């Protein structure tokens, strides 16, 4: 968590930037009640007393689609993680969570709902999260400032709750944008503790395409970042320093079989030895254990996961795992990751620079359907196979597609016509499998055309770095459909992964649009139809022999 001094300095700098830029030249419509800072301190003290006394603490999360949990599994939502962490740390009492999330609503809408959704619930702790839709619906920033100020003032005047202003992520490439700075200024004027979700996401493992790529909502991975920011704001408001921290040991592993185990570090944060409890949660089951930690040291623990192998071992699948730790009273640690198990394959070797006479083919058939199962008319309608060849200076991906009716797509959106999709995760091991797009994750799309019409049209969904501009693509019709060949320079891989790189994320998909250029069917070899949003479910591609039955497990 960010230190309290660092957070305060950041807040002051943000307010100064607003003043210099003149972004909030208009004055707030609401006036801060006298002694608001002291009142907030008193409210924080009361919540802490309730927690320490083992009493019921009612938490109300009041917000838009983020609070509704859109884009998540409904469990790993920021406010649920906060409530569950508090429940574990202060296990003598009860945390009662009430979430009122209203997708698409603005701060103006929130004011109209405030009495029913907030006042009537009599919260002890109130998380207020609105603002992204004000920008999205094109409201004037002046109206946003007025309504956010009124919303926070009503939270102070009409409730006795400790209020946390959860400033929303904003779809703007620049952190110091008008909307974010306005929200920061309003929150600072209100003397209300701030959980700056926008800044936390940008400073964390953010998706390089922004918090809402292609109009989607942040997933559970980003909600963990948001939850940590809220807990940090609570920590600051209550003046409570955490006594213990916990974190999973992340990264990819090539395993001989599906042995479900994770490792984690439990660390004491005090100057004395500490006895701590910790809990691993997965698939509705929990494993409780304890550890003794020497001052300033970390203890690594291996934790078996209480899950069974999936029946379809040829597909990627994943489960969220949550770790909570407590010790010495007060705040503890929390970490949430996703464990993904995926197939692993080895590229064929071709040292002489040519393709092997009998490459290893991998099929795309009925089990690979991700879209249009009821529209699929059988293998002649859409199916395929692919092979991967490791040449001396490049990786070659060969994709042969069976398609009985070609509908040529456009580069505006190749997925809406017949096309091949190739996904590659070239990031370092520390980032392999993270469920957000970052530089080094490739999503390539190739459109089938006649070579007589010129080079095969293809694109990367996101701009390619300079060292990947040497990708070569060929595509041509066949008697039963079309075939594509994509060459990726090995130099680009070693630049990102090092000379001794061990595996990378990989998947192949095909799209079919038989009726008017609108996709009706999609197949993805092992991942999901959301590969373009979440690269966590890619399989593993290796060079050299693999152990029999090997799978790729990635924890991020």
Image (cartoon, rainbow, N blue to C red):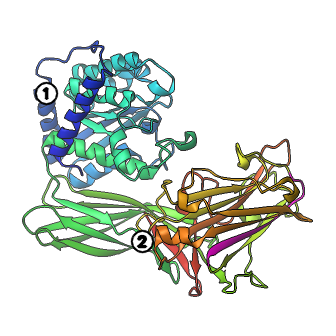
Q: Is residue 44 magenta?
A: no
Q: Going from the N terminus, do you reach mark 2 or mark 1 first? A: 1
Residues shaded magenta: 393-406
- SS under mark 1: helix
Tell me how far mark 2 sits from mark 1, CA to CA.
45 Å
User: Per the image, is 398 magenta?
Assistant: yes
Left or right: 299 in relation to 435: left
Q: Main secondary structure of the magenta part?
A: strand
User: Which residue is depicted at the point 47% across and 45% down?
Assistant: 218
**Quarter of image, res 123:** top left
Quarter of the C terminus within the rendering: bottom left
Disc number at residue 305? 2
Tell me residue 188's x, y (percent).
22, 28
Is 289 placed left or right of 551 in the picture? left
Residue 231 disc label? none
Can you tell which mark lies on residue 37? 1
Marks 2 and 1: which is nearer the front? 1
Label 2 SS: loop
Residue 325, x across and y down, in percent:
25, 61
Q: Can see residue 105?
A: no
Observer-nearest of 207 and 340? 207
List x then y, in percent, for residue 301: 29, 75
Please give the name of the residue rendered at 26% of the width and 20% of the height, measured from the top-left corner: 153
Q: How many marks?
A: 2
Percent of width and height locating residue 431? 43, 63
């Amino acid at each position: 968590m960010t230190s309290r001094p660092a957070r305060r300095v950041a807040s002051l700098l943000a307010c100064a930037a607003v003043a210099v830029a003149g972004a909030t030249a208009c004055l707030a419509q609401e006036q801060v009640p006298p002694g608001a800072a002291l009142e907030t301190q008193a409210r924080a003290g009361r919540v802490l007393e309730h927690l320490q006394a083992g009493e019921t603490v009612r938490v109300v999360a009041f917000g838009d689609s983020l609070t509704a949990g859109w884009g998540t599994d409904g469990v790993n939502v920021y406010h649920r993680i906060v409530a569950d962490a508090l429940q574990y740390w202060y296990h003598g009492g009860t945390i009662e969570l009430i979430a009122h999330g209203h997708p698409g609503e603005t701060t103006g809408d929130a004011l109209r709902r405030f009495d029913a959704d907030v006042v009537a619930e009599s919260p002890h702790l109130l998380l207020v999260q609105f603002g992204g839709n004000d920008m999205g619906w094109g409201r004037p920033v002046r109206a946003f400032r007025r309504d956010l100020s009124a919303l926070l003032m009503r939270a102070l005047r009409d409730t006795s709750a400790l209020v946390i202003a959860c400033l929303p992520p904003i779809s703007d490439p620049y952190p110091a944008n008008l909307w974010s700075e306005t929200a920061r200024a309003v929150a600072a004027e209100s003397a209300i503790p701030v959980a700056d979700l926008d800044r936390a996401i940008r400073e964390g493992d953010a998706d390089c395409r922004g918090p809402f790529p292609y109009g989607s909502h942040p997933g559970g991975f980003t909600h963990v970042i948001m939850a940590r920011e809220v807990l940090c704001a609570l920590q600051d408001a209550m003046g409570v320093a955490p006594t213990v921290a916990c974190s999973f040991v992340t990264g990819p592993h090539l395993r001989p079989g599906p042995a479900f185990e994770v490792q984690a570090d439990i660390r004491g944060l005090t100057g004395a030895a500490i006895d701590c409890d910790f809990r691993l949660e997965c698939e509705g089951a929990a494993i409780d254990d304890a550890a003794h930690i020497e001052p300033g040291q970390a203890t690594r623990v291996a934790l078996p996961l209480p899950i069974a192998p999936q029946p379809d071992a040829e597909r990627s699948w994943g489960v969220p795992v949550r770790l909570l730790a407590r010790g010495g009273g007060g705040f503890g640690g929390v970490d949430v990751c996703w464990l993904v198990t995926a197939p692993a394959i080895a590229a064929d070797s071709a040292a002489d620079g040519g393709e092997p006479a009998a490459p290893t083919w991998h099929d795309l058939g009925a089990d690979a359907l991700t879209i249009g199962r009821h529209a699929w008319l059988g293998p002649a309608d859409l199916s395929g196979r692919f092979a991967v060849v490791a040449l001396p200076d490049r990786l070659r991906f060969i994709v042969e597609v069976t398609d009985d009716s070609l509908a040529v797509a456009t580069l505006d959106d190749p997925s809406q016509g017949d096309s091949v999709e190739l996904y590659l995760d070239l990031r370092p091991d520390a980032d392999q499998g993270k469920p957000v797009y970052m530089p080094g994750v490739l999503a390539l799309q190739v459109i089938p055309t006649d070579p007589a019409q010129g080079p095969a049209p293809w694109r990367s969904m996101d701009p390619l770095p300079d060292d990947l501009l040497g990708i070569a693509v060929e595509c041509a019709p066949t008697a039963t459909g079309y075939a594509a060949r994509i060459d990726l320079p090995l130099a680009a891989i070693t630049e990102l992964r090092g000379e001794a790189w061990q595996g990378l994320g990989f998947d192949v998909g095909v799209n079919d649009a038989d009726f008017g250029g609108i996709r009706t069917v999609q197949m993805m070899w092992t991942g999901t139809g959301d590969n373009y949003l979440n690269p966590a479910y890619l399989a593993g591609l290796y060079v050299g022999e693999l152990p029999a039955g090997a799978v790729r497990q990635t924890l991020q």
